[in-house]
Image: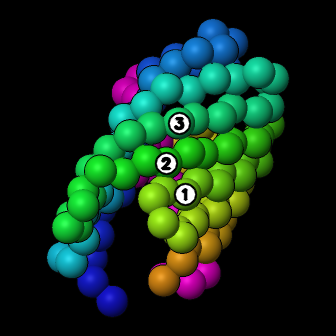
Amino acid sequence: MSPSITGNMTHGNIENQFGTFAWFFVSEFWAEGYVGLTYAPLSYCQVGLGVGIEQAKYPLRFGGSLWLGNGHWSVLSDGGSGFWHRVVANYHLSPLIGIGFMSEKFMGVGPRLELNLPKLPVEL
């Protein structure tokens, strides 16, 4: 197991329907990042499409995401170039803290702790 950092920044919200996002992942052995657009056709559903780069021979990467949620529960599923996935189920204990589990290809399934910084579009 090696330490890693994942960051997610968004602009816009469900009420606005359209928004933008930036996402990155950095570890000792791998790094990748995306930027893209989001669209929320319903108050509990948001889809995103992005383009980015990864640490690979052919660095161009494409990815998509689907978010479903309500006041406390949220589920995010996303995938990138090739056969990769991440599924996150999260229960928001408060506006600042969420707990749940995450499943990621090549990593397995495990617990998740989410910290949201107030008034900043950053999630750790």
The quadrant of the picture occupied by the N terminus is bottom left
Q: Is residue 114 left or right of residue 76?
A: left
Residue 51, compared with residue 103, is above or below; it is above
- Label 3: how many Cα within 10 Å (few below 14, some 14–19, many 20+): some
Check contact, mark 1 vs mark 3: CB within 8 A: no
Amino acid at the residue labelled 1: Gly
Q: Is residue 123 magenta?
A: yes
Q: Which residues are magenta?
A: 107-124
**Residue wearing tag 2:** 63
The spot of residue 83 in percent (x, y) is 54, 70
Q: Residue at x 63, y 10 (%)?
A: 16
| Residue behind mark 1 | 79
Give the SS element for disc 2.
strand
For marks 2 and 3, the one nearer the N-term is 3
Residue displayed at 54% across by 77% down: 105
Name which quarter of the figure residue 8 lies in. Answer: top left
Q: As drawn, which residue projects farthest toward the top?
A: 16
Other residues around mark 2 within 10 Å, as few (<14) / some (14–19) / many (≥20): some
Q: Identify the disc placed on residue 49.
A: 3
Judged from the image, the secondary structure of the residue bearing numbered disc 3 is strand
Does residue 91 appear to the left or right of 58 in the view shown?
right
- Kindly indicate whether the residue at mark 2 contacts the one at mark 1 (C-beta within 8 angstroms): yes
Question: What element does badge 1 sit on?
Answer: strand
From this viewpoint, which residue is outermost toward the front? 58
Q: CA distance from mark 1 to mark 3?
A: 10 Å
Out of 24 and 116, give the one closest to the viewer. Answer: 24
Q: Amino acid at mark 3?
A: Leu
Horizontal and vertical percent position of residue 70:
80, 37
Q: Earlier in the sequence, mark 1 or mark 2?
A: 2
Dot 2 amino acid type = Gly
Can you see residue 102? Answer: yes
